[in-house]
Structures are given as structure tokens and as C-alpha cells.
Image: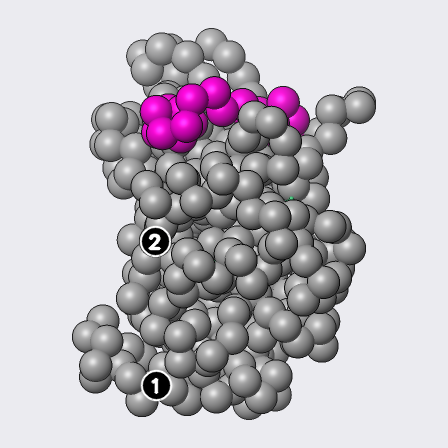
Amino acid sequence: MNTIIEKISGDINSDQPVLQKAAQIICDGGLVAFPTETVYGLGGDAFDAQAAGRIYAAKGRPSDNPLIVHIAHTGDLDTLSDNVPDMAYRLADIFWPGPLTMIIPKNSKVPSTVTGGLDTVAVRLPSHPAARRLIELSGTYIAAPSANLSGRPSPTKASHVIEDLFERIDMIIDGGDIEIGLESTIVDLTGDVPVILRPGFVTQEALKKAVGNVLLDPALMTGVSGDVRPKAPGMKYRHYAPRAELIVIEGRPSAVSERLRSMAAEAVLQGRKVGVMVSEELSHGFDNAEVICLGRRNNEEEIAKHLFDALRQFDEMQVDIIFAEAFSQEGIGQAVMNRMLKAAGHRIIKV
Ligand code: TXA
Ligand code: MG
């Protein structure tokens, strides 16, 4: 398949012709990768069951893993659901447009291929201007997972999308580097108390402040074990996985630094190609290792933004093993560590 690649500048008026072309492709049943504030999405018409099938095929994604429906106005909630929880409007008032996805009961207009057969639907109103304009111009809603091949880290640069999906989809809109770099927070509103199914830029603290009690899906930080199953089907897959083995070291910075250095040195001696993923503070003094610095330790936003790109760079460098520094789980640190531990298959060493 021929994939059109078009750059946009960020000025919504001069970008209009590109977005118009993309909207037309979506109306015709095609697939377009587009920037959002969280990660790049792979969009198709949310009311076209066949488009959903094409999305699963392009990503190589299991079709029991539902897609997020992207809307342009809060009122669109009522088109997708006949009983929108009050809480959804309250959260929308505060956090939309933005990196929050809400799970609500779906109605019969939403194809079951989009929701992986579930009777609920995930809905998000993105804040990225090009994403919103694309939804408006298409005159429909856009079902969009992250625009990566299944199992690879979510794309935070257009080059990541090209790497994974070139010649598998109709169009890629290059909107440059993504602002946040981690996927949206997912909150399930179908029970009495909201439950976070995937942590993200909108933190548990912020949600609690807005609506009172908010729980975390117990499967989140431990990984899938025994009868603890994550409620978001996608969270059970080993996602964000670099090709190399990834080991996370947690503890006081001085102890982590020492252990990282000794483990890296030992692996180098064994003749392995070693990657190290650390804060700026711990990034010095490694010999013969590929060191990627994610940002300053107390700057969670910077770390969040660079994590997925770093995992892809290690793949490109074909390292055999990666040692990573664990970060604080405060605030968006919760989302950062959720992704890092998933990438590591929950291999963590406490020092
Ligand atoms: O930031 C984001 O959310 C990005 C951008 C493109 O908006 N999208 C994204 O989509 O990350 P995706 O498909 O990669 O992740 C969606 C997650 C999956 O884990 C899926 O299982 C879960 O949302 N999900 C979707 N619908 C659900 C539902 N009805 N109930 C529970 N989980 C659901
Ligand atoms: Mg994804």
C-alpha cells in the first residue's frame, strides 16, 4: 500500500488542506496516523466496523483489544452512550480536552469490533489542535489506538510511525515531536467508584481532587499474575517491549548508581552490548555502554517524554541488555514506572 506522508506546521489554518485530505481518507474507510498530545494515533472511522478491522490488521493487534473513540466535543458522549454517568461530565469539564480516556456504557451505534466485544466504550477528547480539527473535518468520530505495531513502544515522533506502519496505512501526518509522550490516563466510570485502568499524565491525585475517591486497578503495578487480571484488555499484553532484556534497579540514588555500574561492567566483560537508561544525575562514568539520559530525576515530564524514544533507540543500537534506573512513583511518575516495569516484564532489583 502506498502511504502518503504530509508534514503540518502547527498553524491550524495553513494545515487545513492536509487535514482535509486526511479527513477524506477516513470518510472513505482508510487509515491515517495523526499526532495527539499523548502519542501518535492510528485513526479510522469509529462507526465503520471494517475500518476497525483494518486497524487491527495494520497493527498486528489482537482484535479482543478495544480501541479508544476520539471525539471533538463533550456533547458527543451522548451519541455513543444512552446512559452517560454524571461523573463523566464532571471529569470532562475539568480534564477535557486532554489526556484522559473514560470508559462508559456503549450503545448500539458503536460497532462491537471497535470495543472488542465489550459493552463499554473508551472515549477521549484530545487537546491537540490538529487532532481535534481532523475529527471535526471528518464529520465522524475517530477510533484510534497508538500508531505502533502491536508490542512496540507507542510512537512519540513521526519517524516512529514511519518505522512501524509505512506501507501498511494510507497516510501519516507528521506533526513533529509529541508533547507528553505517554498514553492517556484511562478511568473506568462504569462502577460506583472510578477506577484507573492505565495511569497517565492526569494523575490519581488530580482525579481525586476533582471527584473524591478514585481507585487503581490492582493489576497495574504487579503485572498479570494468578487471578489478578487487568480490566483494560490491552494492559495484559507485554507492551512497550524493547527487543533486549530490560532490568530496573530501584533504591537510593547512590546505591542504584553503584549497582548499575557494576552490573553494566559485568555484562560488558561477558561481551554483551549494554544499554543504560538513567537520569542526568546518574548518567556519567559508564565505560563501553550505550547511555541514554531521560532527563533530570525530579523532572517527571521530561522523563515521560523521552522514555519510549529511548526504548526504540536501544532496539536500533541492537543492545543485548538494558539496565534502567527506577524513578519516583509520585504524580506522573506512576505512569512512567507503569510503562517501564511493563517493558521490563517486571524484572526489578531493589538495592
Ligand atoms: O493517549 C492515548 O490514549 C492514545 C492516543 C492515540 O489517544 N491511544 C491509545 O490507544 O493509547 P491504545 O489502543 O494503544 O490503548 C487503549 C487501551 C488498551 O489498553 C485497551 O485495552 C483499553 O484502552 N480499552 C479500550 N476500550 C476499553 C474498554 N471498553 N474497557 C476497558 N479498556 C479499554
Ligand atoms: Mg497502544
- Left or right of residue 38, residue 88 in this image: right
In magenta, the rendered stretch is 204-223
Residues 74 and 272: in front is: 74
Element marked by disc 1: helix
- Left or right of residue 270, residue 87 in this image: left
In the rendered structure, find residue 18 and report the number of the disc placed on it: 1
Residues 85 and 153: in front is: 85
- Left or right of residue 203, residue 316 in this image: right
Element marked by disc 2: loop
Seen at 56% across and 26% down, the residue is: 193
Residue type at mark 2: give it: Pro
Image quarter where the N terminus lies is: bottom right
Cβ of mark 1 under 8 A from ligand 1: no
In the rendered structure, find residue 97 and report the number of the disc placed on it: 2
Q: Crowding near pointer 2: few (<14 within 10 Å), some, many (20+)?
A: many
Q: Within the magenta stretch, is there residue 123? A: no
Figure check: 309 above or below 34? above
Seen at 71% across and 73% down, the residue is: 49
| Lower position in the chain sequence, tag 1 or tag 2 | 1
Cβ of mark 2 under 8 A from ligand 1: no
- Left or right of residue 12, residue 332 in this image: right
Residue 159: give x, y in percent of width and height. 41, 68
Is residue 170 shown to the viewer in this render? no
- How far apart, in angstroms, are the residues tagged by discs 1 and 2? 22 Å
